[in-house]
Amino acid sequence: MSFLRQRVQGAAIGVAVADDPAALKTFLAPGCAAAIWRRQTPRAVQGWLDTIDPDSLPCGRVILPRSAVAQTVSHLCNISGLLEGSERSWLCDDIAFLAEMFADLMQAQYLRLRLEAVTSNACRKFHIDVIKARLVCTYRGTGTQYGISTDGSDPRRVFTVQTGAPILLRGTLWPAQPASGLLHRSPPILGKPACATNAVRAIRWRPLTACLRPCGSGCRKPRCPGRRNQRAASGHGIKPMA
């Protein structure tokens, strides 16, 4: 994932907090850099998630039509060996709901879906992604951290999104001005007790343009990797993430 840190004059630094997902449309307003749906995972589901063997957590990356998210997540659960049950059904349905909501907001027909168990400090530095926007939901472990920075330095005050609460984040390719002055990161986990390893369960999406440019601008149509991934997804060529 590409990311950027730079000085931003008159940056968008607003963070909207909504108790109703319908209110997340504030994310599209000028000056809003992020939006959070304040919610909690049902207690029974959270208890189930926290006790799953890390090797059974569904992992994968795929570009797919918005209508195929539920089926794809269920397929990834089957690959990982996650047993069927009411809790798994809730997880699959919730991911599909978030994807549909995000696709509506971004007016995207295709999404890049990424499920991963974070096990390293690869994204420990504060940054802004070189994309249009993304939605991140941490289902297990410490949520995404964010803070304001208009000069490219680390935020002086750091906030942590609650586990189970989705956050929408603008990237540097967001078409409207001013640019975002909100940096984010995955919380550092190396150096913590062994029980913290594999703790973070993050689901991430970003919308794709009509040309399916998963790498952002500069993608030429004949070689667009999004087209190859799109065909793989439509043919159920889904592979677990290494």
Image (tube, rainbow, N blue to C red):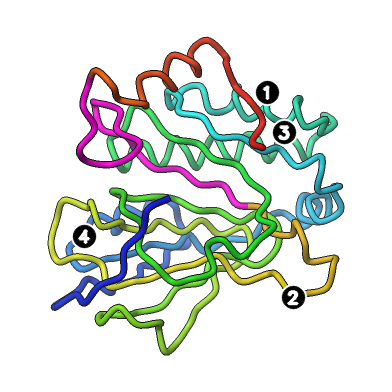
Q: Which residue corresponds to mark 3? A: 89
For the residue pair 221 and 112, the one nearer the viewer reads as 221
Q: CA distance from mark 1 to mark 2?
A: 33 Å
Q: Are marks 3 and 1 in contact (CB under 8 Å)?
A: no
Q: Residue at x 62, y 57 (%)?
A: 164
Q: Which residue corresponds to mark 2? A: 191
Decide: few, some or many residues near mark 1? Use Cα within 10 Å; few <14, some 14-19, many ≥20.
some
What is the three-letter code of the residue carrying label 1? His
Q: Is residue 145 magenta?
A: no
Circle 2 SS class: loop
Circle 1 SS class: helix
Q: Are marks 4 and 2 in contact (CB under 8 Å)?
A: no
Q: Is residue 206 magenta?
A: yes
Decide: few, some or many residues near mark 3? Use Cα within 10 Å; few <14, some 14-19, many ≥20.
few
What is the three-letter code of the residue carrying label 3? Ser
What is the three-letter code of the residue carrying label 4? Ala
Quarter of the rendering containing residue 148: bottom left
Q: Position of residue 198 (x, y in %)?
A: 75, 56
Q: Which residues are magenta?
A: 202-221
Precedes in sequence: disc 3 or disc 1: 1
Q: CA distance from mark 3 to mark 1?
A: 12 Å
Precedes in sequence: disc 3 or disc 2: 3
Q: CA distance from mark 3 to mark 4?
A: 34 Å
Q: Position of residue 70 (x, y in %)?
A: 58, 27
Quarter of the rendering containing residue 179: bottom left
What is the three-letter code of the residue carrying label 2? Gly
Precedes in sequence: disc 3 or disc 4: 4
| Mark carried by residue 75 | 1
Q: Residue at x 25, y 80 (%)?
A: 150
Q: Which residue corresponds to mark 4? A: 29
